[in-house]
Amino acid sequence: MKEKQSVKELQPYVVNPIVCSVKLDANEGSKDLFKDLVKQLGEEFYLNVYPDDSYIDLKKSISNYVGCEISNICVGNGSSELLDLCIKTFVDRDELILSLDPSFAMYSIYAKIFDTKYMGAESEDDFVINADKFIHAIKENNPKVTIICNPNNPTGSMIKKDDVIKIIKSTDNIVIVDEAYMEFGDESVVEEIENYKNLIVVKTLSKAFSMAGIRTGYLLACEELVKTVEKVRPPYNLNSISAFLATKALEEKDKMIAYAKGIKKEREKVYKSLKDMNVKAFPSGANFLFFHSDIKNLEEKLVKEDVLIRKFGGKLDNHYRVTIGSEDENNEFIKAMKKFV
Ligand SMILES: *Cc1c(COP(=O)(O)O)cnc(C)c1O
């Protein structure tokens, strides 16, 4: 065994192998929304050639969807790859990455792999994020890169756009805003990429577009930052089938918008049902709800009812995250919960 020290201390990322009919553990979208696109690959789709490394067709449809220039876009094999590229590009060994606590687990994993320091600024009661305190943490620690997940995973907490801008303005160093779930919220800062030369917004097709299987994400920033990240991006990092399907899905963004609207409505319904059961759920701007429950072994009990949700441990013991699925799936979840409260 000759792995480097930082990898020695790491554990593999374990994905829950349990299979249930009602799968509400991974914030995935609708299985039907874009399933017909696969047929469009057709017989003229050749697999022998490398993808177009400029990804121009995909970038055109991203630019139409977002309202930015082609030169503001970098594409990746899921937004996870783009987060990884940003850390490789901007953070040296022993420099600091500041994020929220709790937040997306991958941030600290990438930090560990690259031997950077990592710090999560603690949120307030009920996982509310106080922008002024966060800015204080930035001033005090001067992170090389700050990552804010908005809406935040796993808590669903939203930071207002004005507050995100205050955070961006508080430092000259890079601020990455991970907007994986922003189609279910309304505080995006994508229109600000030309106004702040230290801002990077990372987005994905995995959630609202319901295409987690094609592993496609994109990064939006001013041209200069995109050029810098492009130096680190491996050629052909996104496969041609994913690039094609993502291009087509973005061209039908109205489908996604209608779907996201339905999810938001369902989210409020599930929120209210949990509240009526005296289960403490936290307000969410995403396609999931985070909640607290003292019911013993709740996850295992729900699995026996064929419903899979995500449980958290450590400091977040007795906390759970449930994805908002189809109306039927959500009803199954609520029905199962009622047996145990
Ligand atoms: C799901 C998720 C992503 C998306 O990852 P992909 O690699 O694009 O599938 C990114 N950030 C957060 C916080 C997420 O929850």
Image (cartoon, grey):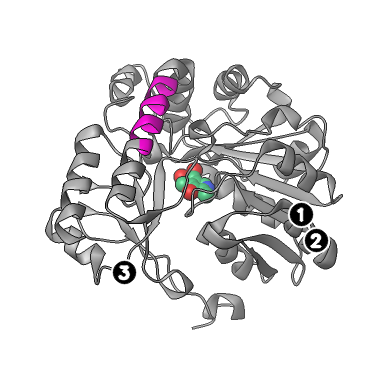
Residue under pointer 1:
132
Q: Which residue is found at the position 51% from the left and 75% from the top?
A: 10
Q: Position of residue 299 (x, y in %)?
A: 25, 63
Identify which amino acid the numbered label 1 is placed on. Asp
Residues at discs 3 and 2 in contact (Cβ within 8 Å): no
| Badge 2 element | helix
Of all residues, the one furthest to the bottom in this rendering is: 1
Give the class, few, some or many, for how many residues have Cα within 10 Å of label 2's Cα (few <14, many ≥20): few
Q: In the rendered structure, does residue 82 fall within the stretch colored magenta?
A: no
Picture residue at 31% right of the left edge, 69% below the top: 294
| Span shown in magenta | 256-268
Q: Quadrant of residue 118?
A: bottom right
Residue identified by numbered label 3: 294
Residue placed most toward the observer, 49 or 266: 266
Left or right of 243, for residue 98: right
Earlier in the chain: of badge 3 and badge 2, it is: 2
For disc 3, the neighbor class at 10 Å (few under 14, some 14 to 19, many from 20) is few
Main SS of residues in magenta: helix
Secondary structure of the residue carrying tag 1 is helix
- Give the residue type that dot 2 points to: His
Instruction: Please name whichever residue, 324 or 232, is drawn nearer the observer in this view of the structure.
Output: 324
